[in-house]
Image (cartoon, rainbow, N blue to C red):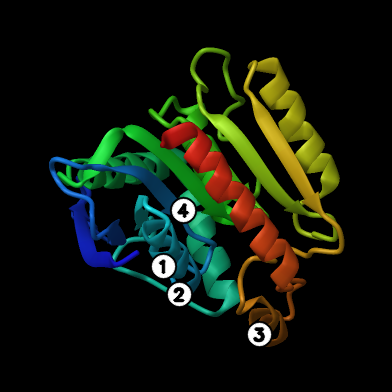
Amino acid sequence: MPIQILQLESTTSDGVELKSYVCLPESASHDNPAPAILVAPEWWGAAAHPQKATERLAEAGFAAVAMDVYGEGKLTTDAAQANEWMSQMLADQDMLMARCKLIMDDFTDLEAVDKNRLGAIGFCFGGKIVLDMAREGFPLKAVATFHGNPDPKQPAQKGKFTAKVLVAHGEADSMVSMDAIEGLKKELDNADVEYTVDVYEGAKHGFTNPNADKRAEENGVDLGYDADAAKASWDEMIAFMQDNLV
């Protein structure tokens, strides 16, 4: 499906420019708005991987935006720099959520975007972001995480966390343990959230990112691309979003 690509610029109350990457199906319009998905990136920023995911979502019929939560379009391939930027976000999670809401509001104001059919996906750090958006009561119908950090800003509350959840987790992920995933399941159970957890045998942290092996080698971190797990988890996510948004 042909797509349109545009940059979405949002300005925070303290003057930071958030430069997000939007992809729309060619067929989306004021009279035919597309179901919409927010894409929260890994700690590298809204780089090639989340941008490609946004393009693929548009090709599948969804309006999508790769959210520039760091601001000014900042990107890195250096793990120490990525960790510094992520830590700054985690030190003020209310600010982080405010940036996500600002991007969401500007994105859903686009006439080709259906704000009533809204989901979110996140990779690694972005997995935490989209779960926290649902925990905050953002109007999301469906949330999917890929090798995501489930550590909550605050635990999910029944009636406030209304999104359905799909979790794609690598069994060999040394950064997010199976215990952490079990903790997420208990949290969601306590809040009566409907969820599915898919565990991919042998898959490491970052398994959806084709650059994971290169980033691992450059930075001495335990990442790994797994083409089979990447394809299977993507296909599951598309079916999940179609079930809940289309």
Determine contact: label 4, label 1, CB under 8 Å. no
Residue at the image position 76 percent from the left and 58 percent from the top: 175
From the image, tell me which residue sits under label 2: 48
Mark number for residue 174? none
How far apart, in angstroms, are the residues tagged by discs 2 and 3?
Answer: 14 Å
Mark 3, residues whose alpha carbon is within 10 Å: few (<14), some, or many (≥20)?
Answer: some
Residue 90 visible, this angle:
no
Dot 4: element: strand
Residue 205 location, quadrant: bottom right
**Left or right: 83 in relation to 60:** right
Task: Name the residue beneath numbered marker 4.
Answer: 40
Mark 4 and mark 1 lie on one chain; the one further toward the N terminus is 4
Query: Label 2 near label 4: C-beta < 8 Å?
Result: no
Q: How much space separates mark 1 and mark 3, taking CA atoms?
A: 18 Å
Distance between the alpha carbons at the discs numbered 1 and 2: 5 Å
Left or right of residue 210: residue 53: left
Q: Read off the residue under disc 1.
A: 51
Percent of width and height locating residue 116 = 31, 30
Quarter of the rendering containing residue 208: bottom right
Q: Position of residue 132 (x, y in %)?
A: 52, 36
The residues tagged by marks 4 and 1 sit, at their Cα atoms, a distance apart of 10 Å
Image x and y of residue 159, in percent: 51, 12
Residue that lies at the very extreme toward the top in this rendered image = 159
Residue 214 numbered mark, or none: 3
Q: Amino acid at mark 4?
A: Ala
